[in-house]
Amino acid sequence: MIDLRSDTVTVPTPAMREAMASAPVGDDVYDEDPSIHALEERAAAMLGHEAGLFCATGSLTNVLGVWLHVTPGTEVLCDVDAHIARAEMGAHGALTGVTMRTWPSAHGKLQAAEVAKIVSPDAGPYLVSTACVAVENTHNFGGGTVQPFDELEAVRDLCRDLGIAFHLDGARLPNAAVASGVPLEEYGRLFDTVSLCLSKGLGAPVGSVLVGSAAAIARARVQRKRLGGGWRQAGILAAGGLYALEHHVDRLAEDHAAARALADAVAARAPQALDPTAVETNIVALDTGTVLATEVVAAAGALGVRVGTVGTRTVRAVTHLDVTHDQARTAGEVLGDVLARADQAA
Ligand SMILES: *Cc1c(COP(=O)(O)O)cnc(C)c1O
């Protein structure tokens, strides 16, 4: 089986397991775990912020990040395909008490003008006031797209002028940095808070980090405990995350090349399914046309290639640390054949 459902499926490398096994640990609820401190300090420094908070998931770091900036009854703006809106089980509404309003986006690409059209700070006694704008980089459901830096800067300026907070769902920010050449820190400095996943392309088994000001992270730590997210000797996990930050960032270029090889192999057989030149990072979105995405997933699965759906007619393949370039190309051939046959049958 070649498993391309997500870059979360990686298992720790022997060297990462070694780092985890020998990690010094303590009780993190008492703020005494040295491995967690090392990870939090490293992540904050890499992203140009004062402090970090290690959490179990990216959903939790997004919930805490947004929570810092809002009060119940205010709104968060994001794009229509944002992970915070679609894939966090309504947590921001259910737990934080915000509503969300979304701007449209093609392939998740940010256009500051779309944000400017709907932003509504200090909206008075009849309308909901915007408290926070959130963007995603790279954009997951958009197909691993990298946000244009000038658009990010324009939204940052807009937020600053209007006194609104700016949060980044940077689950795959290292992919964006490697693909664009823009350093992590330059992206990080645009935002009040950044959420970064260690368990995606970076290949750690568990965890995400939220970074922000020292005061903001101190508040987030209390809210994490309130939500039941305080943990004890989690330094064993943090050590895997720190290893990933130190050793697995630059190699993401290999995943991007593998995704492109997969996309090229699909396009050679089923050109209607995608534009391979639009593949920017490690995610390939395939348009299944007249057949259901679930049928393509089943047919590819029977041929040894596991992929997932992100829409009724969109299949997603994600390259990662545990698939080789050749396996990615082979998977592209299989997916291309399946899509070409489906197209002929239709
Ligand atoms: C994976 C992901 C998250 C966090 O997911 P968890 O499964 O909660 O760790 C957040 N945002 C994006 C864009 C993601 O891809």
Image (cartoon, helix red, strand yellow):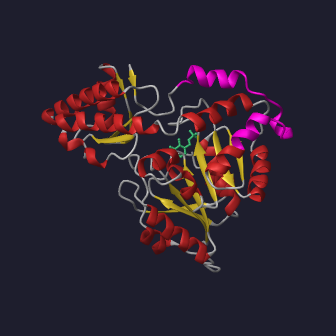
Magenta-colored span: 11-40
- Residue beneath the point at 55% across and 58% down: 186
Point out the image quarter for the C terminus. top left
Where's residue 218, x and y in %? 79, 53
Where's residue 202, x and y in %? 53, 36
Farthest residue, direction left: 344
Foreground residue among 194 and 122: 194
Foreground residue among 94 and 148: 148
Foreground residue among 213 and 267: 213
Foreground residue among 47 and 116: 47
Q: Quadrant of residue 254?
A: top left
Q: Is residue 56 left or right of residue 2?
A: right
Where's residue 9, x and y in %? 50, 28
Where's residue 258, x and y in %? 35, 34
Give the number of marks. Answer: 0
Q: Is residue 16 left or right of residue 144?
A: right
Ligand 1 falls in quadrant: top right
- Residue beneath the point at 24% across and 37% down: 264
- Residue beneath the point at 51% across and 45% down: 174
Does the rendering let one see residue 225?
A: yes
- Residue beneath the point at 51% across and 32% down: 8
Farthest residue, direction bottom: 124
Farthest residue, direction right: 30
Q: Is residue 37 within the magenta segment? A: yes
Point out the image quarter for the N terminus. top left
Q: Is residue 93 within the magenta segment? A: no
Main SS, magenta residues? helix
Q: In the image, is residue 300 above or below residue 134? A: above
Q: Quadrant of residue 126?
A: bottom right
Does the rendering let one see residue 127?
A: no
Q: Is residue 267 left or right of residue 254?
A: left
